[in-house]
Image (cartoon, grey):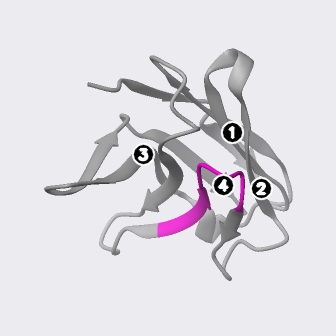
Amino acid sequence: QVHLVASGGGFVQAGGSLRLSCAFSENITSVYTMEWYRQAPGKQRELLASLNSRGSTIHADSVKGRFTISSDNAKNTVYLQMNSLKPEDTANYYCTAARTRSYGLETFWGQGTQVTVSS
């Protein structure tokens, strides 16, 4: 069982920055793909960024150039640096760890951290 704890959310004005952290219970980045999602009220959950076990990253078009996923393996933490925030970035943000097992996809979710961007 992998435990994930997300933190770093809060209130920020448009144009500001936040860094979200996702701390996990063991060093898993060499095995799991780490991802950040968000979900705003009344909207579908959106995949924002992925960091795979080889260190490759992918960012959604909606956040490319503004958000960056990274990891610090010594701290067992994955980050989401968010710059140039917009009111439409307001949502609950979640981190996940996922890998393919013989029986299917194994995914662990952290609790969400709320980000509110004021105009």
Q: Are marks 3 and 2 in contact (CB under 8 Å)?
A: no
The amino acid type, in three-letter code, at marker 3 is Thr
- Of circles 2 and 4, the one toward us is 2
Q: Based on the displayed image, in which of its 4 quarters is residue 65 positioned?
A: bottom right
What element does badge 3 sit on?
A: strand
Mark 4 vs mark 3: which is more N-terminal? 3
Residue 51 part of the magenta segment: yes
Note whether 86 is above or below 22 in the view shown: below
Q: CA distance from mark 2 to mark 4?
A: 18 Å
Left or right: residue 18 versus residue 99 is right
The amino acid type, in three-letter code, at marker 1 is Tyr
Residue indicated by mark 1: 79
Q: What residue lies at 58% left-to-right and 38% top-to-bottom?
A: 30
Q: Position of residue 42 (x, y in %)?
A: 30, 72
Residue indicated by mark 2: 68
Residue indicated by mark 4: 117
Q: Are marks 2 and 1 in contact (CB under 8 Å)?
A: yes
Q: Based on the displayed image, in which of its 4 quarters is residue 118 positioned?
A: bottom right
Note whether 49 is above or below 18 in the view shown: below
Q: Which residues are magenta?
A: 47-56
- Of circles 4 and 3, the one toward us is 3
